[in-house]
Image (cartoon, rainbow, N blue to C red):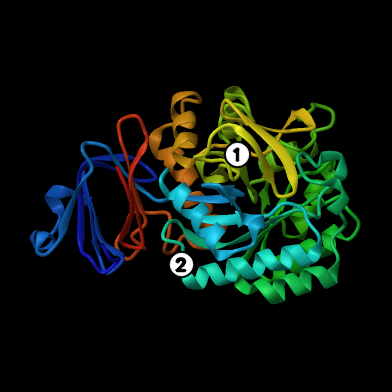
Amino acid sequence: MSAGQAWVIGNGRLVTPDEVVEDGVVVVSAGKIVYAGPARDAPGSVWDGSVELDARGGYICPGFIDGHVHGGGGADAMDASPQALARMAQAHAAHGTTALLATTMSAPHEQLLGVADAVRRAQLSGTGGARLLGLHLEGPYINPERAGAHHRAWLRPPAAAELEELYRVAGPALRTVTMAPELPGAVEAIRWLSARGITVSLGHTAASYEQAMAALDAGAQAATHLFNAMQALHHRSPGCAGAVLVDDRVRVELIADGVHVHPGVLRLAWRCKGAAGIMLVTDCMRALGCPDGEYTLGDVDVVVRQGQVRVRDNPAALAGSLLTMDQAVRVMVQAVGVSLPDAVRMASLTPAEALGLAHRLGRLAAGYEADVVVLNQDLEATITMVAGEVVFQR
């Protein structure tokens, strides 16, 4: 059904940033939320001409926003086509993601320009799944010592001419740039990007605590997959991880699959940052929804086996994940002990705030975009709505 359809999503519990409201409803008209709250307080007229969606006693949540996703459904952002981006968006919508940033791997400059152009075109054509908020440039401006699965041949310090051309091609679609702040020219690049409203996320870095703090002072606002591809936290050398844990200016990404980061360390991050300082991300790659086997992540050969992704020529190295946003919420609730409102906030409102979109995304409130996910008792997505259109239901 179209986004113009009026809906009442009921028979469920409404998840807000602060509480779970029993017997809640969300009323949607023309792609916007017109009411969200207790069913008893909903205007009687809302049922006129509306189609009812039964939450079956589950949890009605704001749609999940994934700021770091490489692929899914057999497609990769580096395929550089609107069709591939649409397949990704549809695959993740089946797990509650209503908005995402297509995320690159390190590559030659011309190839990254092609991805930026494809993202811009896909934003215009639509995806049929999660909305495409823009581009997350993860690499090539990262430290070879902390490259992870990135191809070291493409790594380089930030260059003003490259950034200017990327910005010219992508325009407002360029949302986030991961950068190692210790690289030559990085602090100047951070200032340039931040002045244009682009979030700089510290990651794939061997930066010291002092170097990370200097980057935050220059305008960096986030950290890419905290604890992964950065110096381990040490009491005499806290590094980038220590800096971003204690600085309230920073929101941090966490890959909450229980593999990339131990549940005890996820709990540590939550105690330091709170739900307002953590953005759950998947770092998912193209094999989501596909059988085990050999795949590529960008131009890196990887092996998918038993739910994990590893570099083919270096099996000790993780290479993205098959994580989904509903699974990340489950891990935070069931393995870490976070409340459901906090876990959902980390998957919705906090990333919306980081992207400057909290005025229209990340909450179930009148006037907001009708991006909604319904979770069952096991915290699995059963209904996903984007801009008032049901894009997934089971």
Check disc 1 and give the amino acid type.
Leu
Q: Where is residue 201 in the image (x, y as percent from the top left)?
A: 70, 52
Q: Which residue is drawn at 49% across and 43% down?
A: 346
SS at mark 1? strand
- Alpha-carbon neighbours of circle 2 within 10 Å: few (<14), some, or many (≥20)? some
**Front-lying residue, 217 or 336:** 336
Q: Which residue is drawn at 88% across and 53% down?
A: 183
Pointer 1 residue = 254
Q: Where is residue 338 in the image (x, y as percent from the top left)?
A: 46, 30
Taking 326 as reference, is 175 above or below it?
below
Quadrant placement of the N terminus: bottom left
Q: In this view, does 251 lie to the left or right of 106?
A: left
Task: Looking at this view, name the residue that lies furthest to the right.
Answer: 184
Q: Residue 126: which disc?
A: 2
Mark 1 touches mark 2? (CB < 8 Å): no
* Residue 130 visible in the displayed image: yes
* Residue 99 visible in the displayed image: no
- Alpha-carbon neighbours of circle 1 within 10 Å: few (<14), some, or many (≥20)? many
Quarter occupied by residue 334: top left
